[in-house]
Amino acid sequence: MATKLAALVVLAAFLAGPAACDGASICFNGWLRLPTYNAALCRPRPDVQTRQRRPAPSGSGLSSGYYNTRCPSAEKIVTDAVKKAVDANPGIGAGLIRLFFHDCFVRGCDGSVLLNTTNSKNSDTEREGPPNQNSLRGFEVIDEAKAAIEAACPDTVSCADIVAYAARDASYFLSDRKINIQMPGGRYDGRESFSNETDQLPGPFSNLTALQGSFAAKGLTSDEMVTLSGAHTIGRARCLFFSTRFSEMEPAFAAKLRAQCNGNDGTNVNQDDVTPNVLDKQYYQNVVDKKVLFTSDAVLNSTKTITQVTENANMTGAWERKFEKAMETMGKIGVKTIGNQQGAEIRKVCWRVNN
Ligand code: HEM
Ligand SMILES: *[C@@H]1O[C@H](CO)[C@@H](O)[C@H](O)[C@H]1NC(C)=O
Ligand SMILES: *[C@@H]1O[C@H](CO)[C@@H](O)[C@H](O)[C@H]1NC(C)=O
Ligand SMILES: *[C@@H]1O[C@H](CO)[C@@H](O)[C@H](O)[C@H]1NC(C)=O
Ligand SMILES: *[C@@H]1O[C@H](CO)[C@@H](O)[C@H](O)[C@H]1NC(C)=O
Ligand SMILES: *[C@@H]1O[C@H](CO)[C@@H](O)[C@H](O)[C@H]1NC(C)=O
């Protein structure tokens, strides 16, 4: 009983919304601090149990310079909007990179993460899913770029492509222009978005098997998982997700975090204490130094992944090149490229489907 009550309190604090108790939350295993997961009530997750990898995403139908003839100003409009936003607040750049990851892992890179209004009007969208609610940021940058692009060339550039270009540009500016992702375009926008599908995103409490499994389910390798985790060298995280781990961290780092959190689950702290706003390889040294926040970060110190962690930490440029490649590959997951034939479209406004 006491355990159940505690679990409810945690869930309520975590979801921070009145409509949160939909019962489905118990399936968000890697996102729960307490072991409330009940496999019997959740749909089977073969991706987490095995490490059978889907084929790597082909991204067929995408091409670089896709809008050069269709809407020549499109990419520059995105770049300018991202530059302005990152100059004002580097955290928004972190938000844009994460937005891309969360878009691509749920229904493919189809802009479904941006929707707060769909045709199935009563169902919650991805934006309300536990990994996303009160957490994702950068939407206004996407909306601003989209508005300017629609004014220049209506009905031509997808929101999914804007998210992908924005992640590319945020990576460029936050890395002091050292990370230059070749990001193709040609994605169409989806017309559905369901909060329950965000359980496909790995969570901060996921173990190594679960992390590898969730990436494998999208056709990504364990190496790509380790490479992409390096994005936790920027941005912020809420105390809720790591306050059970202070004793496993480097003592001075733990003490600083403890003071910052001050018992408050909702407080945000920097993920990388050393270079908080630079997209660099510092994350991998942090893993070795026990200066990372989540279980999902700390488990990269395992025999299967430590070689890569050590290499990334100390070989100049190695991680940066792998990150460029892995982001490009992530951008190919589940893309819709033949428009209406797959129930896809070019949205006019990124947060709602066309009528
Ligand atoms: C490997 C599994 C991963 C897990 C378990 C995970 C989990 C998380 C969590 C829990 C947060 C903090 C959210 C909050 O407190 O509101 C976060 C933040 C972040 N994650 Fe991940 N993540 C993973 C992989 C990735 C990948 C692949 C990327 C991008 C390539 C990424 C980019 C980010 C960024 C940039 C932030 C900071 C966002 C901000 O400041 O707005 N993460 N992640
Ligand atoms: C997710 O929610 C939607 C809408 O409520 C529902 O139709 C669908 O069956 C749910 N999917 C799963 C896998 O639970
Ligand atoms: C949906 O999100 C956008 C920001 O992307 C916001 O401007 C709009 O007001 C939201 N609409 C609804 C119905 O919540
Ligand atoms: C890892 O997590 C999965 C999913 O939560 C769980 O089924 C499995 O038992 C865990 N593995 C280990 C070694 O703890
Ligand atoms: C990494 O794993 C090794 C071997 O299990 C252990 O001795 C070491 O303390 C761990 N380091 C970190 C940073 O967790
Ligand atoms: C990287 O090299 C430095 C200097 O040799 C060393 O102090 C550090 O421990 C190395 N990092 C890793 C993760 O091996």
Image (cartoon, grey):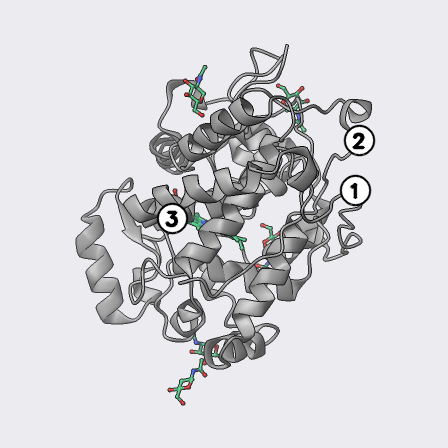
Q: Position of residue 62 (x, y in %)?
A: 74, 44
**Quick one: 238 or 191, which is closer to the camera?**
191
- Secondary element at tag 1: loop
Q: Which numbered dot is residue 61?
A: 1
The span from disc 2 to disc 3 (Cα, nearest Å) is 39 Å
Residue depicted at 50% across the width and 62% down the height: 179
Q: Are marks 1 and 2 in contact (CB under 8 Å)?
A: yes
**Quick one: 353 or 120, which is closer to the camera?**
353
Q: Earlier in the sequence, mark 3 or mark 1?
A: 1
Q: Residues within 10 Å of mark 3 (few under 14, many from 20)?
A: many
Q: Residue 2 lies in what quarter of the image? A: top left
In the picture of the structure, the residue carrying the numbered disc 3 is 241
**Quick one: 149 or 182, which is closer to the camera?**
149
In the picture of the structure, the residue carrying the numbered disc 2 is 338
Q: Which of marks 1 and 2 is nearer the N terminus?
A: 1
Residue depicted at 63% across the width and 12% down the height: 119
